Image (tube, rainbow, N blue to C red):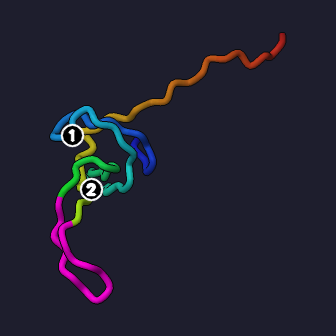
């Protein structure tokens, strides 16, 4: 199951074999935003609060194009005595 903060690896697309952390999930469309993956250029108009220009931001990727990266668990003995 993919949750916010999960480490994932991209299986297909322009960012194939890259790894990142899940930022946002859209459950209704089964899409996910991953940090520094699938970057797109967005033209932003100048407003009173914000400066305009071209910004780069993450775009959504379909969940089927991702695989979770599992952390290795240490198999250390607990020291329990019988």
Q: Which residue corresponds to the image point at 27% horizontal and 44% vertical from the top-left?
A: 63
Compared to residue 53, the image places residue 11 above or below, namely above
Name the quadrant containing residue 40: bottom left
Left or right: 33 with respect to 78? left
Q: Position of residue 32 (x, y in %)?
A: 30, 51
Q: Secondary structure at mark 2?
A: strand
Name the quadrant containing residue 75: top right
Nearest to the observer: residue 19 or residue 52: 52
Nearest to the observer: residue 62 or residue 45: 45
Name the quadrant containing residue 23: bottom left
Judge whether residue 31 is colored magenta: no
Q: In whole angstroms, how far apart are the C-alphas of marks 1 and 2?
A: 12 Å
Q: Which residue corresponds to the image point at 24% horizontal and 39% vertical from the top-left?
A: 64
Nearest to the observer: residue 34 or residue 80: 34
| Residue placed furthest toward the bottom | 48
Span highlighted in magenta in the image: 41-54
Q: Position of residue 52 (x, y in %)?
A: 21, 77
Nearest to the observer: residue 53 or residue 16: 53
**Residue contact between numbered discs 1 and 2, judged by CB atoms under 8 Å:** no
Question: Which quadrant is the C terminus positioned in?
Answer: top right
Circle 1 packing at 10 Å, graded few (<14), some (14-19), many (20+), is: some
Return the disc, 1 or 2, that comes first in the chain's sequence. Answer: 1
Residue picked out by circle 2? 58
Q: Position of residue 7 (x, y in %)?
A: 41, 40
Q: Position of residue 79 (x, y in %)?
A: 78, 16
Q: Which residue corresponds to the image point at 39% horizontal and 43% vertical from the top-left?
A: 2
Circle 2 packing at 10 Å, graded few (<14), some (14-19), many (20+), is: some
Question: Which quadrant is the N terminus positioned in?
Answer: top left
Left or right: 25 with respect to 70? left
Compared to residue 70, the image places residue 2 above or below, namely below
Judge whether residue 48 is colored magenta: yes
Residue picked out by circle 1? 15
């Amino acid at each position: 199951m993919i949750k916010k903060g999960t480490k994932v690896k991209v299986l297909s697309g322009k960012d194939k074999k890259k790894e990142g952390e899940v930022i946002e999930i859209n459950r209704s469309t089964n899409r996910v935003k991953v940090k520094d993956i699938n970057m797109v250029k967005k033209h932003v108009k100048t407003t009173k609060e914000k400066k305009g220009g071209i910004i780069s931001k993450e775009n959504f990727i379909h969940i089927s194009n991702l695989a979770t990266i599992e952390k290795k668990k240490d198999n250390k003995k607990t020291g329990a005595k019988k």
